Image: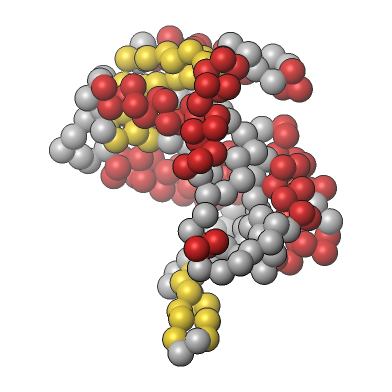
Amino acid sequence: KAIKKVVDVNVDFVNTAIALRCFFSPSPLTPYEGVYRVRPGSFIKYKEGKISEGRWYNLKVRPDKIKTYEDFRDGFGELFESSVDLRLKSDVKVGSYLSGGLDSSLIVHYASQKQSNLPVFTANVSDPLPSLGKNYDNENSFRFANERKLDRTVIDFNYDFINENLLKAIASYDDLLPNTGILIFNQISKIARSKGVTILYDGVGGDELFGGYPWQFDIRKVPECFHGCLS
């Protein structure tokens, strides 16, 4: 919506099809022709009618520092735990989302070791997608929280809730909305805030790092001609 206030844009139906197939828009693609996202670690500079792209961050890879798989495994674990610990340092109450995935489960695992009363919030989706079959998110998160005796709040969601709130989300969202996760995050955030929790960990993005969901393999079906720009 903001872009349309500046320039005329047309829908790119190929990019839209890719986003709907993959359940997200692979960077740097957008739903519009000739419009691209700023790449991670990059910035856009506009001067005298010209646009240029630059990098403000480059990941430094040191292969010489990783000699074995065990070195990589142990080093990653230490960095991950340190990252979680760092973000627990806050002067307000901290909590976490907890789904049944590896990402949020790992975050809560480490965070609950540092903060025993860590409040967690779980979405109980009573009407899972038929294509997903068994609702692993609900089952895994419940078992995980019970085993660790976490301070858990469960928020129920169904198609009635989605139908009542979907148009509101679309009106406030500038990108395609290929899944209903944004509705769940928004509602959980409201309930967490009502309980005095103002900071929430989440595992968004971790799906790609730790394995993800079966439907995310669909990105492999994107035509090879697009692979060069999906980075």
Q: How is the image coloured?
A: secondary structure
Q: Position of residue 49 (x, y in %)?
A: 50, 86
133 with respect to 98 (left or right):
right
Question: Which residue is at the front of the view, 127 or 213?
Answer: 127
The image shows residue 17, relative to residue 185, as above or below, that is below
Which quarter of the picture shows residue 180? top right
Asked whether the viewer can see residue 31, the reply is: yes
- Mark count: 0
The image shows residue 123, relative to residue 214, as above or below, that is above
Which quarter of the picture shows residue 149? top left
Q: Position of residue 104 (x, y in %)?
A: 47, 31
> Looking at this rendering, what residue extends furthest in the left direction?
91
Question: Which residue is at the front of the view, 125 or 31?
Answer: 31
Point 35% across, 40% down: residue: 84
The image shows residue 10, relative to residue 133, as above or below, that is below
Q: Position of residue 115 (x, y in %)?
A: 26, 27
The image shows residue 21, relative to residue 122, as above or below, that is below
Q: Position of residue 52 (x, y in %)?
A: 52, 82
Point 22% across, 40% down: residue: 89
Point 41% across, 48% down: residue: 79
Quadrant of the drawing holding the C terminus: bottom right
Point 59% across, 53% down: residue: 68
Asked whether the viewer can see residue 140, the reply is: no
